């Protein structure tokens, strides 16, 4: 693969993305998704092994099948759907914005994600051999009559056995689309976005605090690793470092 310099990029919240880094993009479509993406490294999620995934326009990375649902439901979902939801809401990238993704084994990118994971999970030594970066870049909401956009990212990484996810939130300006009851001018109200993880059963799931409530608008200022806008998780056997921190309030993980 082509090597791309990431000089000084470790100081930024988002991992590098876009055409410069050979990213692909999902179709400009309402409730659209990427094709099924075969991945070169096994990714374990709640002890299940996956070798493919979908990048969905509506803020979800899914395993098994795409997700076209635009109004989110709160977790847990018990219908067998298994997915990572950085910000599940009604994105419409036909209006503006792009959903980028790439699989990578670039050495410098692997070194960066390894350093991040080792900092957040110091009890074990992890060396990344694979990373997948999906970025929702300045995406609008369905029915938008405003200039409000969201930029957020999911970073999946693995060494073939251990799996981790970083969720990065650079700028969140809206929480619901018009078809979910949101206001066309503000992107607020209605059924707000859901963020977290769902294994498709009643027991294995995690809701980032504020999910499915108006306070999800503040997700870019919250964290569980003391870095506003970033959440870090081990997901092969689900673990949340430091419990769960929301605006200085400590909670135990579900």
Image (cartoon, grey):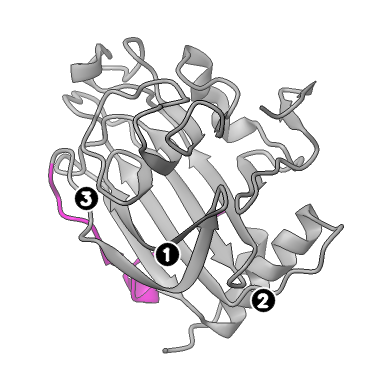
Q: Position of residue 189 (x, y in %)?
A: 35, 10
Residue 126 placement, left or right of 198: right
Magenta stretch: give its range: 13-29
Mark 1 or 2, nearer chain start: 1
**Quadrant that contains the C terminus:** top right
Q: Which residue is mark 1?
A: 17
Residue at position x 78%, y 63% in the image: 118
Q: Which residue is mark 2?
A: 111
* Foreground label between 3 and 2: 3
Q: Position of residue 49 (x, y in %)?
A: 48, 60
Mark 3 or 2, nearer chain start: 3
Q: Within 10 angstroms of label 3, few (less than 14), some, or many (20 or more) residues?
A: many
Is 26 within the magenta? Answer: yes
* Foreground label between 1 and 2: 2
**Closest to the observer, 16 or 76:** 76
Q: Which residue is mark 3?
A: 33
Q: Mark 1: which secondary structure? A: loop
**Closest to the observer, 53 or 154:** 53
Q: Mark 3: which secondary structure? A: loop
């Amino acid at each position: 693969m082509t090597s791309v310099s990431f000089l000084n990029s470790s100081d930024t919240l988002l991992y590098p993305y876009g055409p410069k880094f050979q990213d692909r993009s999902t179709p400009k479509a309402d409730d659209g998704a990427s094709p099924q993406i075969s991945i070169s490294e096994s990714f374990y999620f709640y002890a299940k092994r996956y070798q493919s995934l979908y990048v969905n326009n509506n803020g979800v990375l899914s395993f098994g099948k795409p997700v076209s649902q635009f109004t989110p439901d709160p977790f847990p979902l018990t219908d067998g759907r298994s997915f990572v939801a950085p910000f599940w809401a009604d994105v419409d990238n036909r209006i503006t914005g792009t959903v980028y993704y790439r699989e990578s084994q670039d050495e410098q990118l692997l070194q960066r994600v390894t350093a991040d994971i080792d900092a957040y999970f110091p009890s074990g030594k992890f060396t990344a051999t694979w990373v997948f970066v999906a970025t929702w870049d300045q995406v609008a909401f369905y029915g938008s009559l405003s200039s409000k956009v969201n930029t957020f990212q999911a970073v999946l990484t693995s060494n073939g056995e251990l799996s981790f996810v970083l969720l990065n939130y650079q700028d969140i300006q809206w929480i619901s689309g018009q078809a979910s009851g949101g206001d066309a001018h503000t992107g607020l109200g209605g059924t707000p976005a859901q963020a977290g993880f769902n294994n498709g059963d009643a027991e294995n799931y995690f809701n980032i605090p504020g999910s499915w409530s108006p306070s999800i608008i503040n997700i870019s200022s919250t964290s569980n690793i003391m870095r506003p806008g970033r959440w870090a998780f081990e997901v092969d056997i689900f673990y949340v470092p430091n419990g769960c921190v929301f605006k200085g309030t400590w909670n135990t993980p579900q």
